[in-house]
Image: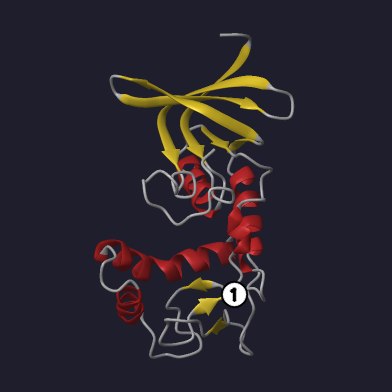
């Protein structure tokens, strides 16, 4: 192996979209060192394309809404082949995650009385989408990246991973290069995390774009 720079973290997160950033923030909140690796510049993840909003049963517009209705809508929308447990967790926790984003600085559209505004969207029985105009994804990424940096997460931008490092216990690190300067980088970690967008093309059959959502 030629000259390379080594970094050691307690946790490595591969992928800096909404899921990867939130995972990095959660890990950092426990006091461990976190390295975040992304294939582009921070803030340019495909999450910015989520224009519609974030589904959460806050019941700010229609008080008939609750997590059970959200759960039912989610299962029906998935033709009942989706994971009921994941749908349940999503429906129950989504309101807290939206309020969390608000506390971290996300600027949502508002109702006349100052609550987070929600609108209708396909598959939802009641107005449920908390939104920021037509740029919700952009606001989501802006908020999460700011909080990740504030939380002490170290970000490695424009890095392409070429291999995962393993031993008898499993994955223990990653090896790649910084595209801008062609420097090799090696990162060791006791707990690597791959964000959903990173492994979206891993199955033999997948609908995610190989160009937009390609693995790092």
Number of numbered markers? 1
Q: Which residue is mark 1?
A: 131
- What kind of element bears circle 1? loop
Q: Nearer the viewer, residue 3 or 118?
A: 3
Rendered location of residue 132, percent (x, y) = 64, 73
Does 158 sit left or right of 72 as displayed? right
- Look at the picture and state if 128 lies above or below 214: below
Viewer can see residue 82: yes
Farthest front residue in view: 205
Could you tell me which residue is drawn at 29 percent across and 23 percent down?
169
Rendered location of residue 183, percent (x, y) = 67, 20
Viewer can see residue 105: no
Rendered location of residue 15, percent (x, y) = 53, 43
Farthest right residue in view: 181
- Look at the picture and state if 155 lies above or below 85: above
Could you tell me which residue is drawn at 46 percent across and 46 percent down?
195
Q: How is the image coloured?
A: secondary structure
Based on the displayed image, in which of its 4 quarters is residue 168 positioned?
A: top left
Could you tell me which residue is drawn at 57 percent across and 79 percent down?
116
Check the picture and name the quadrant holding the N terminus. top right
Rendered location of residue 177, percent (x, y) = 62, 25
Does 61 sit left or right of 73 as displayed? right
Q: Nearer the viewer, residue 173 or 49?
A: 49
- Look at the picture and state if 8 lies above or below 117: above
Circle 1 residues within 10 Å: few <14, some 14–19, many ≥20: many
Could you tell me which residue is drawn at 33 percent across and 82 percent down?
69
Check the picture and name the quadrant holding the C terminus. top right
């Amino acid at each position: 192996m030629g000259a390379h720079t080594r970094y050691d973290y307690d946790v490595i997160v591969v992928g800096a979209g909404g899921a990867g950033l939130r995972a990095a923030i959660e890990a950092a909140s426990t006091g461990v060192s976190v390295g975040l690796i992304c294939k582009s510049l921070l803030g340019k993840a495909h999450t910015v394309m989520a224009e519609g909003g974030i589904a959460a049963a806050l019941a700010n517009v229609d008080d008939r809404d609750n997590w059970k209705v959200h759960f039912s809508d989610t299962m029906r929308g998935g033709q009942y082949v989706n994971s009921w447990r994941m749908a349940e967790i999503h429906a129950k926790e989504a309101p807290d995650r939206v309020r969390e984003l608000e506390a971290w600085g996300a600027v949502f559209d508002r109702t006349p009385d100052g609550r987070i505004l929600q609108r209708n969207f396909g598959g939802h029985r009641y107005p449920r989408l908390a939104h920021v105009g037509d740029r919700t994804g952009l606001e989501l990424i802006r908020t999460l990246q700011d909080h990740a940096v504030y939380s002490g997460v170290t970000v490695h931008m424009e890095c392409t991973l070429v291999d995962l490092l393993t031993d008898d216990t499993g994955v223990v690190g990653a090896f790649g290069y910084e595209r801008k300067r062609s420097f090799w980088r090696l990162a060791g970690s006791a707990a690597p995390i791959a964000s959903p967008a990173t492994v979206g093309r891993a199955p033999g059959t997948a609908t995610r774009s190989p160009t937009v959502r390609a693995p790092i």
